[in-house]
């Protein structure tokens, strides 16, 4: 079986083509960016509408397949930004009708988890999911994904982008903050861990205040990263102990950050656990993960209306493919 997957939850519009054996044939994408400011929903949707057909064509060309070879179309049904999700859903329905192909909607967050396992070979890990909206510590128990801890306010990726917007770093800000942090030194920042949950809103406020008071941007970026990453490292370690697991898998867009990977790897070695990080190409949003999740669920998951579900949670999804 070959599945074409469509990703459009936020700033990235991606199309991936994957076989049922887990071979990724193509993973084309285009990302909405700005020099200053953040995402304006209608502008993101317009971006996706403008480039969606060309990204499909690029993926088909890279995979060297035609529509006769495609057996299934999957799209990201949520969670995400409703206007962006609608573009992906509408395209999936259009392609399904034009080429007489079955269609399935999948959960974007779960797709991040399963592409991580596919690419790393992790068997039964604790997942640390860090992206724009999401910061969650997850593990499979009782046939479902269980969330052992999560952000109480904003995701770590959005926290980085909010501070980046205040600092005039453009969007996405994460890579620029990482680069600046390498030249900075630590300044004390709010460290908020409540049980297994984290909070990043105060960190954004404090970082912005320090910048306005004249602190060097390199130092503020360094302190921001050190504090935020220490928080998620702490809760990840407790989850490993509680779940009695020996694998930690880092997934989501913020998994591309080398400093975060270094901190988690050090912690895992101290616990005699294995650390896995999803490869850079599959860390952020992309279509290959949607295609792979479509293959995993085809014919196994309960039928659900072809629609978008902007607030669908990971822990509502049954693991029918494990």
Image (spheres, rainbow, N blue to C red):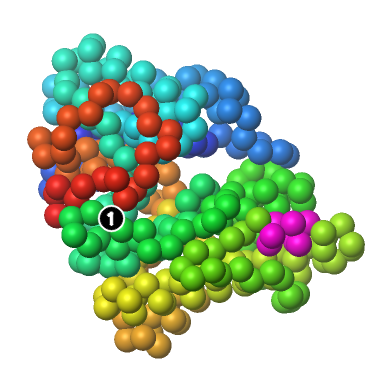
Mainly helix, strand or loop, the magenta region? helix
- Coordinates of residue 288 in the picture (x, y in percent): 30, 42
Image side of residue 155 versus residue 222, left or right: left
Q: Is residue 41 above or below residue 29?
A: above
Q: Residue at x 30, y 63 (%)?
A: 139
Q: Quadrant of the N terminus?
A: top left
Query: Few, some or many C-alpha atoms within 10 Å of disc 1 (few <14, some 14-19, many ≥20)?
Result: many
When asked about the image quadrant of residue 105, the answer is top left
Q: Quadrant of the C terminus?
A: bottom left
Helix, strand or loop at mark 1: strand
Magenta segment: 202-208
Residue 89 seen: yes
Q: Is residue 107 above or below residue 260?
A: above
Q: Residue at x 59, y 61 (%)?
A: 199
Which of the pair 140/171 is nearer the observer?
140
- Coordinates of residue 6 in the picture (x, y in percent): 34, 32
Q: Which residue is mark 1?
A: 145
């Amino acid at each position: 079986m070959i599945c074409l997957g469509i990703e459009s939850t936020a700033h990235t519009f991606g199309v991936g083509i994957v076989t049922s054996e887990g071979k990724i044939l193509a993973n084309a994408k285009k990302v909405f960016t700005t020099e200053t400011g953040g995402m304006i929903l209608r502008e993101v949707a317009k971006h996706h509408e403008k480039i969606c057909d060309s990204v499909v064509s690029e993926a088909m060309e890279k995979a060297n397949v035609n529509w006769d070879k495609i057996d299934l179309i999957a799209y990201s049904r949520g969670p995400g930004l409703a206007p962006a999700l609608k573009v992906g859903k509408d395209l999936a329905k259009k392609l399904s009708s034009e080429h007489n192909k079955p269609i399935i909607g999948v959960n974007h967050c779960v797709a991040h988890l399963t592409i991580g396992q596919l690419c790393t070979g992790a068997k039964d890990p604790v997942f640390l999911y860090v992206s724009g909206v999401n910061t969650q510590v997850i593990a499979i128990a009782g046939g479902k994904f269980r969330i052992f801890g999560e952000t109480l306010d904003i995701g770590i990726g959005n926290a980085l982008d909010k501070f980046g917007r205040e600092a005039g770093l453009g969007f996405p800000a994460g890579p620029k903050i990482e680069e600046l942090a390498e030249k900075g030194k630590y300044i004390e920042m709010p460290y908020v861990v409540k049980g297994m949950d984290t909070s990043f809103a105060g960190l954004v406020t404090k970082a912005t205040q320090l910048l306005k008071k004249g602190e060097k941007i390199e130092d503020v970026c360094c302190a921001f990263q050190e504090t935020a990453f220490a928080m998620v490292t702490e809760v990840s370690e407790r989850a490993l102990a509680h779940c009695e697991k020996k694998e930690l898998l880092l997934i989501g867009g913020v998994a591309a950050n080398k400093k975060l990977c270094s901190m988690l790897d050090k912690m895992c070695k101290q616990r005699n656990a294995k650390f896995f990080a999803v490869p850079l190409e599959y860390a952020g949003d992309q279509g290959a993960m949607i295609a792979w999740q479509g293959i995993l669920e085809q014919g196994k998951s309960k039928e659900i209306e072809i629609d978008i579900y902007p607030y669908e949670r990971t822990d509502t999804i049954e693991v029918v493919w494990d």
